[in-house]
Amino acid sequence: MNKVLRAVLAGLAGIVLVAVIVVLVLGWKSPRDQYLQVEARAVPIPTDAAAIERGRYFAHAIGVCGVCHGDDLAGQNMSDSMIWGYVFTPNLTPGQGGIGRDYEPLDWVRAIRHGVDRNGRAFAFMPVDHYYHITDEDLGDIIAYLQHLPPVDNAGGDIRLGIIPRAIINSGVIGDLVRPELMDHNAPRPEPAASRGEYLALIGGCDFCHGPTLQGGQGPEPGAPPGPDITGTGRLAHWALGDFAAVMAAGALPDGRTINPMFMPWKGYRNLSGEDLQVLFDYLRSLPEARSGSRQG
């Protein structure tokens, strides 16, 4: 009898699970089907070589755009399976199939700061909750760099998500990372970060996996390990700057293990300058006392 009861309960649990997934999937409205009225505010776009170089550094080392868009920012295939779906990130260059062919400065502001294209269509997987905090000066430098990208022909494709990611997204676990419509796009610009180190941690999205206090969290990706405490109360209390630099440059932990770049984008962060590594390390080790709470908006 117990075996029969267990089998019945297991069957009921399976039915409930399937029903939940069906509801989540059928009730899902793709973030790519959302059109938002966003009043983007223009920022000054410099033209000098120094600004373009600053934009290149910010895009690749701090914003780690290449992790999703490829080292040349021409887009890349992130997934192509029945379960997970087809995900090809946009080509940012002015080459064939690239949005850089006809994007104006204000279009770039909408894309980077608000997560929508020039028509107001929401981008999926654009980390707008972090990029919204980029200063006007840095955003101008980034756009100046993007406007000078060499053309790369790569038509790629669009995003067609599979059953599992649709269920995850519709459950609200990932939040406004893939749903720019949940943001208040008319909110006042957030207060500047109290330090360069805090700014780097904020734009870099450390809290996405390590939690809002950076004292540990859980990334939303399926199979992602828990994000450890990276403050002065955690592993950084026992690390030297060289240990931190090795993690950021090659994912190499002091105990010999290597962090999976799928869950920790060290292949992007390895481009950080020595000075920025130092201020980021100092900031993280100073937590939780030094956190200014400027992450708002």
Image (cartoon, rainbow, N blue to C red):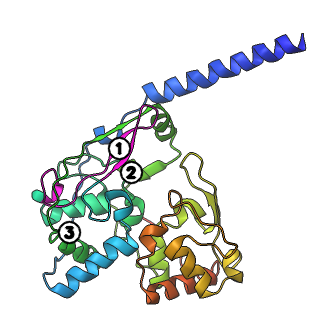
Q: Residue at x 45, y 35 (%)?
A: 166
Magenta stretch: give its range: 76-100
Q: Residue at x 38, y 67 (%)?
A: 64
Label 2 or label 1, whichever lies nearer to me, is: 1
Say which amino acid is labelled 1: Val
Q: Residue at x 49, y 69 (%)?
A: 266
Numbered disc 2: secondary structure: loop
Q: Residue 247: x and y, percent?
A: 56, 74
Question: How far is the residue under mark 2 from the one under mark 1?
Answer: 10 Å
Say which amino acid is labelled 2: Phe
Q: In which quadrant will I find the C terminus?
A: bottom left
Residue corresponding to mark 3: 146
Residue corresponding to mark 2: 125
- Report which quarter residue 101 is drawn in: bottom left
Label 3 or label 1, whichever lies nearer to me, is: 1
Q: Residue 131: x and y, percent?
A: 37, 65
Residue corresponding to mark 1: 87
Counting residues from the start of the chain, the first of labels 2 and 3 encountered is: 2
Horizontally, residue 267 falls left or right of residue 112, namely: right
Question: How far is the residue under mark 3 from the one under mark 1?
Answer: 22 Å
- Report which quarter residue 1 is drawn in: top right
Q: Are marks 2 and 1 in contact (CB under 8 Å)?
A: yes
Judged from this view, the residue extending furthest toward the right is 1
The crowd level at tag 3 (other Cα within 10 Å; few <14, some 14-19, many 20+) is many
Counting residues from the start of the chain, the first of labels 2 and 1 encountered is: 1
The crowd level at tag 2 (other Cα within 10 Å; few <14, some 14-19, many 20+) is some
The crowd level at tag 1 (other Cα within 10 Å; few <14, some 14-19, many 20+) is many
Q: Nearer the viewer, residue 219 or 272?
A: 272
Say which amino acid is labelled 3: Leu
